[in-house]
Amino acid sequence: MSATAGLRSAALDLAAIPERIQSEVERAIQRSIKGVEYIASSGPSLGSTPKDILAVRGTMNLYHYRPMADEIYRVPILIVMATTNRGYILDMVPGQSFIEFLLKRGYDVYMLDWTAPKPEEKSLGMEDYVLDFIPDCVRRLQQDSGEQDVTVIGYCFGGVLSLLYGSIFSDGPMKNLICFTTPIDFREMKLFSNFSDRRYFDVDRLVDSVGNVPPEMILSSFEMLRPASRAVSQVQLWENIWNDEFVKSYRMFDRWATDTLPLAGEYFRAITKDLMWDNKLFNDTMSVGGRAADISKIEVPILHAVAEHDHIVPYDAAKHLIAKVGSSDKEEVMLKGGHVSLVAGANAIKRLWPKLDNWLGGRSI
Amino acid sequence: MVDKGNDPAVIWQTMIGEMEKGFNAFANRAMESPEFSKAMNQAGGVAAGAQKQLGELMEKYLLSMNLPSRAQLVGMAERLQSMEGQLNEIKALLVQMNRNNGAPKDGGATPRPPRTKRPPSEGEQK
């Protein structure tokens, strides 16, 4: 920068100082007012898209969302949610709901969501999720919709369950498969892999002593991936507390992120041993309930959406999925964003949702 | 208008962002070591054992105070949930029966839309 330009810039700064001070004072006052409001009020109501509960069986919940279009695609969608978190991340508030988006675009949407497994459900294993819960939901969906075909969408570990289901029931009713940020090479989830290092992590002792793995432990392991981020997000909240839209968004995502579910003990044991330790899905040696789960058997059209800055499922852990499935109609799409902003929020509205609609519409007739 | 490069608020936010990235990266490097895994799992194992013992102790205490334990409350919640589940099953069956009889879903609500939608052609408004 030249000396003249520097002086001009400094002069501009001096002229703007009173305006800037006034703006900061106004924000400080707003922060105090809004800060009190924040503490005194509850957050926005989440997951309010009208739906019917088709089935509740222990930890398994099957919803059907009421159609919003005059005409819908023939093939219904079953969303399989990750077992660690609640499904309302895909149905935040009107205008920011993936479910609402799908309904308005003419899809018939069902969701397999999870509630906390009860202590007596600690014996639920991988086979209960893959060979019982998902097929049961598919059957109920077929009965309810009158259609045999189904598009399965799995988010994160819901994607892993969908892959296992699709590989075991490769001649079944799954017509299309969409995975969001689905890990397949668990060695590449480096921190989780280190946390569960078989030399130091006694999963048998943990499961045998606590039964279901407590949600606090799951949440801590997620938060440890970015240990400074919670503190920084609190600072950002305070700075932006005058901004209603920021606060609304913060509350939605913070509530969801901390609303972590416990994991059934045997299920957690299987994840640790088969996936984290032996990397069986990647090594093509995975089996569930004695049935081989080789994902090369999946031959339906598949879309895998991954996030450029995913700190939970890094790209290296997800990138082999498309190469390993047997489908000829397959596509991976990498979008800007992180593990959560890929599927929800302003980023998703602009990027993932329209992409998914373009891909799925023609395959849903 | 304030030059963004000289705006103290922007400088502060950039600094916080950089500190966050730096600390996360530093912590992640430390957490990739086997020593970290060992220490973390030793602490975690002790905590899990302590949690179990505390739970058993609390159960005995609640019993002596003639108060319901968590297990008993969970049992009650289980029964309520089972009743809710059965009601949902009955509701689903009724809806199915209504539909089989040609009545609209939910006894009078709008019928389901036809499954005839085709994807819009290129350039068409969605």
Image: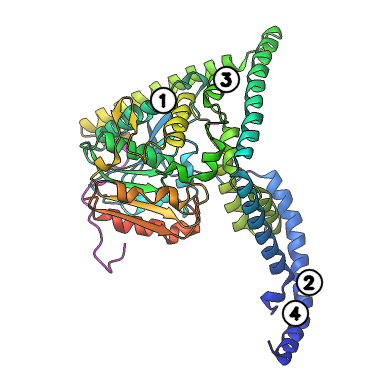
First reached walking from the N terminus: tag 3 or tag 4: 4
Q: What chain does mark 4 sit on?
A: A
Image quadrant where one finds the N terminus of chain A = bottom right
Find the distance from the CA under tag 2 to the CA under tag 4: 9 Å
First reached walking from the N terminus: tag 3 or tag 1: 1
**Residue with the mark numbered 1:** A125
**Residue with the mark numbered 4:** A16
Numbered disc 3: secondary structure: helix
Magenta stretch bounds: B108-126
Hey, which quadrant is residue B65 in on the image? top right
Number of marks in the rendered image:
4
Q: Is residue B4 left or right of residue A332?
A: right
Find the distance from the CA under tag 1 to the CA under tag 4: 64 Å
Q: Is residue A221 left or right of residue A275?
A: right
Judge depth for marks 1 and 4 and give the one in front: 1
Q: Is residue B107 above or below residue B9?
A: above
Check disc 3: other Cα within 10 Å, few if <14, some if 14-19, many if 20+.
some
Q: What chain does mark 1 sit on?
A: A
Asked if badges 3 and 4 are on one and the same chain, I answer yes
Q: Is residue A174 above or below residue B72?
A: below
Numbered disc 1: secondary structure: loop
Residue B125 forms part of the magenta stretch: yes
The residue under the point 39% across, 53% down is A305
The residue under the point 49% across, 59% down is A346
Q: What chain does mark 3 sit on?
A: A
Find the distance from the CA under tag 3 to the CA under tag 1: 17 Å
Between A73 and B13, the one nearer to me in the picture: B13
Question: x, y percentage for residue A276?
Answer: 46, 36
**Residue with the mark numbered 2:** A21
Identify residue type, mark 4. Ala
Residue A209 is tagged as 3
